Image (tube, rainbow, N blue to C red):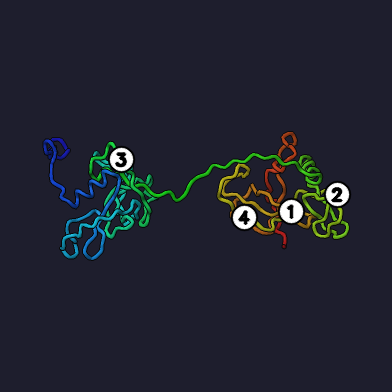
Amino acid sequence: MPSDPLVAEHVLEFPGGYTRTTGPVIGRFLTELRDGRIVGVRTAQGRVLVPPLEYDPDTGEAVTGDYVEVGPAGTVVTWAWVSTPRKGHPLDRPFAWALIKLDGADTSLVHAVGAGDVKAMRPGLRVRPRFKPEAERVGDITDIAYFAPEVTSMVSHIRAEYRIQPGRSLARFLEGIRDGVFLAGRCARCDKVYVPYRTSCPACGSVIEEEMTLPGTGTVTTFAINNLPDPRAPEVPFVSAYILLDGADVPMIALLGDVPAHEVRQGMRVRAVWLPPGERTLSMSNIKWFAPTGEPDAEL
């Protein structure tokens, strides 16, 4: 015997369509929809009902006949996500059924929200109606094709091209980086050693005439763990750190590599990892990153 349960297919259909009169209140609401407007009706207590009702649901009194244009924007009160739309649903992609309280209304309207992603839905979401083209409107709630979230953010693709010409001191420093050495300048008056190389002392303003070569080793003074991709980084997350080169009095910033981000620490001893000589140019990218030396941590 077949294992599938017995299934009987049935169809309920009204040939020619089911016709009913709308009455003056709902009729006014649907006529306004056809014209691209949403209206509610005011009760004797001053509440605005959307969709309009002929009688106040709280008191049973007839409404006043005072129609009020509301919205068109509104706020999602609550919602349910439809991940797999069915035939007859207002959208052919995932959407939400939502209770929407339109601006100026005291009650909520049920309609579809095309948010694009379930993560975009939340109570309090601001939405606006997307009406069908005027020629397609017939005076039905479906004249509003769906509601869409208001624009609260935008993506701007930014790209700037610019050229930098280094001064004499930076050009000299980059020549050293091309040759695999760190060039520094020592102020004869302050006895401070600056790297990158400088031709004047930032502390006292004296001309720096003494050029020094520093080793490619140093100590991590502070660092940051970065979780956004960077084409220069060895992996994500990666670490950028201030490194005090041996013999220098000011640190320089560089990437750290060959070490898990969670193992980086202040005082860690590191060394520069260089590109092969044949690949080097007048650029800081000649230093791939700094890597641990394996020495004991330094005291800061």
Foreground tag (4 vs 1)? 4
Residue receiving disc 1: 218
Residue receiving disc 4: 224
Secondary element at tag 1: strand
Instruction: Tell me the kind of residue under disc 2.
Output: Glu
Q: How many marks?
A: 4
Foreground tag (3 vs 1)? 3
Q: CA distance from mark 4 to mark 1?
A: 17 Å
Quarter residue 130 falls in: top left
Instruction: Tell me the kind of residue under disc 4.
Output: Ala
Please state the horizontal and vertical placement of residue 111, each as a whole percent of the image: 28, 49
Residue receiving disc 3: 132
Please report contact status of discs 2 and 3: CB closer than 8 Å, yes or no.
no
Q: CA distance from mark 2 to mark 1?
A: 19 Å
Please report contact status of discs 4 and 2: CB closer than 8 Å, yes or no.
no
- Residue 240 visible to an observer of this rendering: yes
Q: Earlier in the sequence, mark 4 or mark 1?
A: 1
Along the line of sight, which residue is nearer the eye, 204 or 127? 127
**Disc marking residue 211:** 2
Crowdedness near tag 1: few (<14), some (14–19) or many (≥20) residues, C-alpha within 10 Å: many
